[in-house]
Amino acid sequence: MSPTAPKIRRRGEESDVKEIAQQVIVATLARCAEQGLLPALEGSVPVEAPKNPAHGDWSSNVAMMLAKPAGKPPRAIAQLLLDNLVDPQNAVLKAEIAGPGFLNLWIRPRVWFEGLEAVLEQGTKYGESSVGAGEKVMVEYVSANPTGPMHVGHGRGAVVGDAIAALLKAAGWDVTREYYVNDAGGQVKQLGRALWVRYREQCGIPVPEPELPRPPEDPKTPDEKRLKKEWDEARAKILPYPGEYLIDVAKSFKEQHGEKWIDATPDVQESLFTDFAMEKMLEVIKGDLAALNIHFDSWFRERTLHEQKAIDQAVATLTAKGDMYRGILPPPKDAAHAEDYEPREQLLFKATAFGDDQDRPLQKSDGSYTYFAADIAYHKNKLDRGFGWLIDVWGADHGGYVKRVKAAVKSLTGRDALDVVLVQMVNLVKGGQPFKMSKRAGTFVTLRDVVEEAGKDATRVMFLMKRADAQLEFDLDLVKKQTLENPVFYVQYGHARCANIFKRAKEAGFERPAFDVELLERKLTHPDELDLVKRVLSFPSLVESAARAREPHRVVFYVQETSAAFQSFYTKGKKQPELRVIRPDEPELTRARLLLTASLQTVFANALGLLGVSAPEWMEVPKDLE
RNA sequence: GCGCCUGUAGCUCAACUGGAUAGAGCGUCGGACUUCGAAUCCGAAGGCCGCAGGUUCGACUCCUGCCAGGCGCGCCA
């Protein structure tokens, strides 16, 4: 390396070109402030990557921000900065003023190429950082009641939660993935009752019909509709979970216990039968999750809270803080729920003091705790286990619950230690039409059905392409298609193409080359190549921002865009052979391009890894395209 | 009635958290393979960013009010 060559500071994990640009601006501002040309800038110095490449590699709007305090027009300030630019590393190729007063910087290619060394050195670890500083964070997701197999909507929460956890881990947090098992409420008791009914069925006692006139399958008149509703309700009382999956559970219960529980008391139904059914359901759920390659570090059972008197303790803690009182709640605003309201003094949590719309009850009229009380105890338990940051991934149907739980956590910690990611509803689409699931019509689609037919990669990509807080159309046909309409192919294809290039290169006698910045600088002179290098090097900051924002969809877009840029360059080699990656007549050029290819393959593999999508070496052509 | 989420190209969605000319995929139309994978690429058409105000150098982004869709609204979990 020549003495005059720009040399960048290496900090192991993030040799970031953005840092260099930022340092230039910071140093320049400092010099201007010293010389009394400009007032000092409060806060951090904004440097960002413009969308439009004509605006440079990095752009800063400091001149606009200083316009008011300095009492000078932005462009004049930008000129001042330009005249006093401090660039000890000689990293800046060009700097100019543009638009209303942006200061745009172009960085020397050499500096960019230097950055690739970290990519190749770190390999599978490239993109990781330590911004999380090892802080313990818990990501709780899925937490579906163990009363049946998972449906497609659960799958979205599962995949999004899993990807968020992976992102945070990559960004340096100490992540624990936890599933909260609601094994204490009325729903699992009903599951036990339902199992008992199915068990009796196995013993030859048919499931009783409601003692009501049977309504028509397709009710039309209001009378028929009312009749059907009543019948359904009566049926649900007899068999709260009508799904066929309980039949298998009943068979295995009978195998194990024989017929001695035919006349089991309700107590036994809600203990022995409940526990048996629930454990089976948890196995089913674990299997559903495993099919998506999702594995939890911890399964936390609500019952442990009750056993440990944790709810009493949590209430005591809130009481000691002065956030509990006895009072009467106003009636619900909505007519449907106001009907059976009666004013009653009860134990209330002062949620309004922490941003909720209403204070919230912790006890039911029979004196038992509400679900919310248990949830407070659960979140307190998480905090007690040393997690400084809690992330809950919930379905949109729990949206009304966010404020009160955040309020409780704020009361317990004095800060906003809980973030809730609400995953909006999934609307199934089939044949271009909204697809309504109906158990009776046999059109109930489980998550497992989809994963088995479409594969985990296609399913995960479908869920991860969109922001969690937007509703999602899940196209049951599209996710199964083995064509390029299915987004999963393009997402994976960039990686497969890189892998294949190395296969071809080997056949042509090229091994994976060692890093050589001189070689890169000398040989990679095409603008597309430098553009690709920049995209590769933006990966760590992408991971960091996606992690902070808890938005895994950004990673999908990154892969698609980077892949598109690479394919575009690659295809130019069809018409311009001088642009091909493998050029047996030009070994140096080939080696340089293989270095670029290797770095691209690394970011593709790492990005796919964050998404939990496999990175194939080769992808078969689907039959209908041959 | 109240709270939360959403409204961007024909369809499905982005837009780096206030930046410069709002971008992709699919679909449509038109092009490109005797050689590194055409599962690809190039180009075109397609937009009052739901509507109306406001904040400022600058708004898809923030504030207010409407309109539309979704979710929820003590003793379900």
Image (tube, grey):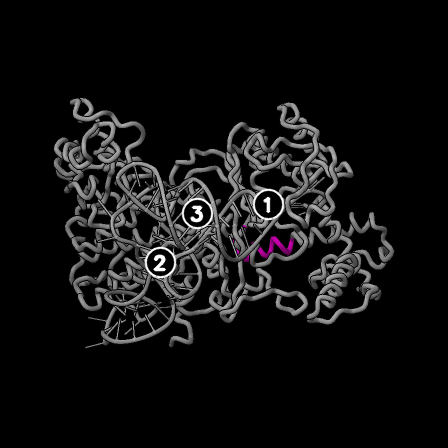
Residue identifier under label 3: A551
Between A17 and B52, the one lying in front of the other is B52
Which numbered disc, 2 or 1, marks the residue closer to the eye? Answer: 1
Identify the residue position indicated by label 2 in the image.
A495
Secondary element at image label 1: strand
Q: Which residues are magenta?
A: A283-294
Three-letter code, disc 1: Tyr
Q: Position of residue A575 (x, y in %)?
A: 19, 68
Chain bearing tag 1 is A
Q: Work out whether mark 2 precedes mark 1 in sequence or the reverse, and give the earlier one.
A: 1
> As shown in the figure, which amino acid type bears the numbered disc 2?
His
Q: Quadrant of the C terminus of chain A?
A: bottom left
**Which circle, 3 or 1, is nearer the viewer?**
3
Q: Is residue A193 above or below residue A367?
A: below
- Labelled disc at residue A179: 1
- Mark 2 Cα within 10 Å, few/some/many (few <14, many 20+)? many
